[in-house]
Image (tube, helix red, strand yellow):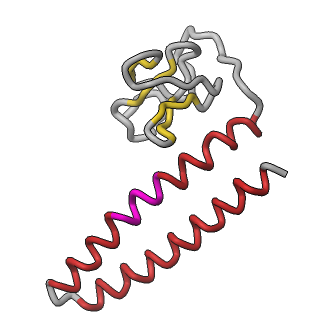
Amino acid sequence: MCEECGCGEKMALTCAECGGRMVLINDVPVCTACGARGNSAAGVREHHGHAHSHPGEQPRSGPDELTRLRILLPHWLEHNEEHLHDLRAWAAKAHELQKGAASELMGVAIEHMEACNQALAEAMEALKQ
């Protein structure tokens, strides 16, 4: 766990340009602070860094919040899709294990996550207007 912010992350990709936190969008690292893009081998360094600053560091400047939101929404959508894939597989496994109630409840969770993803996709479209 990060001792600075308590976020629970041990390692994160950090932007080599500004030190901001990188997220993967379609397997391409994108900085949530400055919007820089790179590949995992170049322009990115691993560190426990996050969007907060460490003692003695200067605050980082970056894009406005709208730009950050346009970066984060696709990341959240992609991340949820990865979880949905796993959840569907485990719901099927629970059914095979004759744990019908658990499987059904996981199905409810899947429906909610699909609705969440639909709302995130609509939010992305609304930002384009």
Q: What is the span of residues highlighted in magenta in the rendered image?
A: 79-85
Q: Tally the numbered discs.
A: 0
Which is more toward the observer, 7 or 13?
Answer: 13
- Percent coordinates x, y for residue 87 in the rendering: 34, 69
The residue at 36%/79% (across/down) is: 106
Image position of 28 with respect to 17: above or below: below
Q: Is residue 14 magenta?
A: no
- Specify the quadrant of the image occupied by residue 39: top left
- Percent coordinates x, y for residue 5 in the rendering: 49, 33
Q: Is residue 10 found left or right of 118 in the rendered image?
A: left
The residue at 40%/65% (across/down) is: 84
Image position of 126 with respect to 68: above or below: below
Give the overall secondary structure of the magenta segment.
Answer: helix
Furthest residue in direction right, as rendered: 129
- Specify the quadrant of the image occupied by residue 7: top left
The N terminus appears in which quarter of the rendering?
Answer: top left
- Percent coordinates x, y for residue 25 in the rendering: 51, 41
Furthest residue in direction left, as rendered: 97
Q: Is residue 6 found left or right of 85 in the rendered image?
A: right
The residue at 38%/37% (across/down) is: 9
Which is more toward the observer, 125 or 45?
Answer: 125
- Percent coordinates x, y for residue 91 in the rendering: 29, 77
The residue at 50%/36% (across/down) is: 23
Which is more toward the observer, 91 or 56?
Answer: 91
Q: Is residue 26 found left or right of 17 in the rendered image?
A: left
Q: Is residue 70 found left or right of 22 in the rendered image?
A: right
